[in-house]
Amino acid sequence: MSTSVEAGRSGALNTPTSGLPKLYLVRFAFAVVWAVSLALTASTLGPVSIALLVIYPLFDVVAAVVDFRTSGTDGPRILLYVNMALSLLTAVGVAVAATSGIPDVLRVWGAWAITAGLVQLFVAVRRYRLGGQWAMILSGGISTFAGTGFILMSAGPNASLTGLAGYATLGGIFFLVSALRLRQRAGKVN
C-alpha cells in the first residue's frame, strides 16, 4: 500500500507530495533489509524467522496508518482500513501458523498476498493520475499471482520460506520505482 495525494482536474497535485515518495523509499529499504534477513534464516522456522514473518505484515499496518493519515479525505480510506485489518490478521495468522510449520505459514502468507495485492491494485488504479502508479498496479497484480504460488507451494514436498524473500524484494523495487517517478513528476509540477 502507499501514501496518497490527489490530483485535481488540471493534473496538478493539490496536496503536498513529499509524504508519498518518502513512504515508498522507506518501504523499499525495509523490504530489502527484511528479505536479506529472511533469506539468511529461511531454512527453518526458528525464533528469528518467525519474528521476521510477523514483523513484515505489522510494518504494512504501520505504512497503511501513515498512508491513512496523509491521504486526506479524498484518499482511499476504506481500502486502507481493509489493508490494515488484513495485515493485522496476517501477523496473528502467521504467528499461529508458525506453530504448525512452513506449509501453514505459506498458506497464510499466500492468502494475504492475494488479498493485499488486490487492495494495492485498487488503490493504485484510483491514484493513477498521480503518476508512478503503474509500478504499484504491477506490484498488486503480481502479488495476487505470487500468493497463489505460495499456496500451491505449501502443498508440495519442497515448501520453503525463501520465495518470500524474493517476493518482498520485488515489491520493494516497485516501491522504489514509484518513489522515483513521483519525485520526478513533483519536480516538473514545481
Image (cartoon, helix red, strand yellow):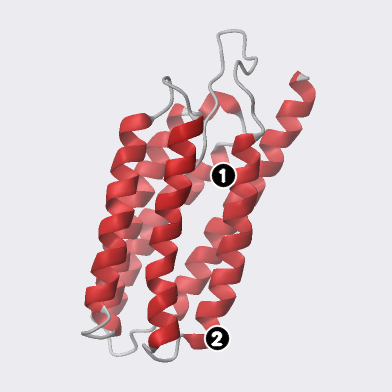
Q: Is residue 155 above or below residue 57?
A: below
Q: Is 156 in front, or is 118? A: 118
Element class at badge 2:
helix
Q: Does label 2 or label 1 sit earlier along the sequence?
A: 2
Mark 1 is on which residue type? Ala
Q: Position of residue 95 (x, y in %)?
A: 28, 74
Q: Is residue 102 left or right of residue 12?
A: left
Q: Residue at x 42, y 35 (%)?
A: 123
Mark 2 is on which residue type? Leu
Element class at badge 1:
helix
Q: Quadrant of residue 59?
A: bottom left
**Mark 1, residues whose alpha carbon is within 10 Å: few (<14), some, or many (≥20)?**
many
Q: Position of residue 102 (x, y in %)?
A: 30, 83
Q: Is residue 61 above or below residue 49?
A: above
Q: Is 39 in front, or is 170? A: 39
Q: Is residue 121 left or right of residue 30?
A: left
Q: Is residue 152 visible?
A: no
Q: Position of residue 55 (x, y in %)?
A: 42, 67
Q: Residue at x 72, y 35 (%)?
A: 183
Quadrant of the rendering where the C terminus is positioned:
top right
Q: Residue at x 43, y 82 (%)?
A: 49
**Which residue is labeled 2 in the image?**
40
Residue 182 is labelled as none
Q: Residue furthest top?
A: 10
**Which residue is labeled 1 in the image?**
135
Q: Quadrant of residue 129?
A: top right
**Alpha carbon of mark 2 to alpha carbon of mark 1: how far?**
28 Å
Q: Quadrant of residue 78?
A: top left
Dot in front, 2 or 1: 2
